[in-house]
Amino acid sequence: MLAIKLMRTGAKKRPSYRIIVKEKQSKRDGAYLENLGTYNPTREPAEIKLDMDRVRYWMEKGAKPTETVSQLIKVRGKQQATAPAEV
């Protein structure tokens, strides 16, 4: 079973995360199938970069996001909805 999870990167006391697709039972920092984006909670406001097309693709394939990643997807979706359209 596939999961969309956070993988910790960054230095001690300065976390940053990759949002990745991997097997549900694998280790947090083990091998993964695809990197979907990044999350940096140390910035103000927290920085979320996410490829929503790939997220939708993997969710259609059966990947389930963790609770935290679900919240990040919702926040990112709201950010995209409120962003002005580029010409």
Image: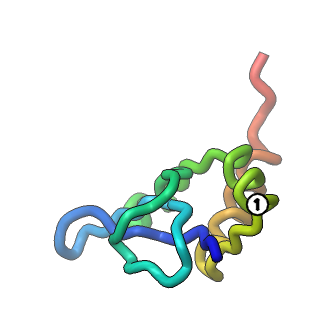
Q: Residues within 10 Å of mark 1 (few under 14, many from 20)?
A: few
The foreground one among 24 and 43 is 24
Q: Relative to 84, does residue 15 appear above or below in the rendering? A: below
Residue sitting at x 77%, y 54%:
56
The foreground one among 76 and 67 is 67
Residue sitting at x 77%, y 56%:
78
Can you give x and y, in whole percent of width and height, for residue 30 in the image?
35, 70
Instruction: Tell me if residue 9 can be seen.
Output: yes
Instruction: Tell me if residue 39 can be seen.
Output: no
The foreground one among 64 and 87 is 64
Can you give x and y, in whole percent of width and height, for residue 70 in the image?
69, 72
Q: Relative to 1, does residue 86 appear above or below in the rendering? A: above
Under tag 1, what secondary structure? loop
Residue sitting at x 63%, y 45%:
51
**Label 1, on which residue?**
61
Which quadrant does the C terminus fall into? top right
Which quadrant does the N terminus fall into? bottom right
Residue sitting at x 54%, y 55%:
48
Asked whether, in this view, residue 29 is left or right of residue 57, the answer is: left
Q: Quadrant of residue 62?
A: bottom right
The image's colour scheme reads rainbow
Can you give x and y, in whole percent of width and height, for residue 20 in the image?
51, 60
The amino acid sitting under disc 1 is Lys
Residue farthest top in this picture? 87
Total count of labels = 1
Asked whether, in this view, residue 52 is left or right of residue 66, the answer is: right
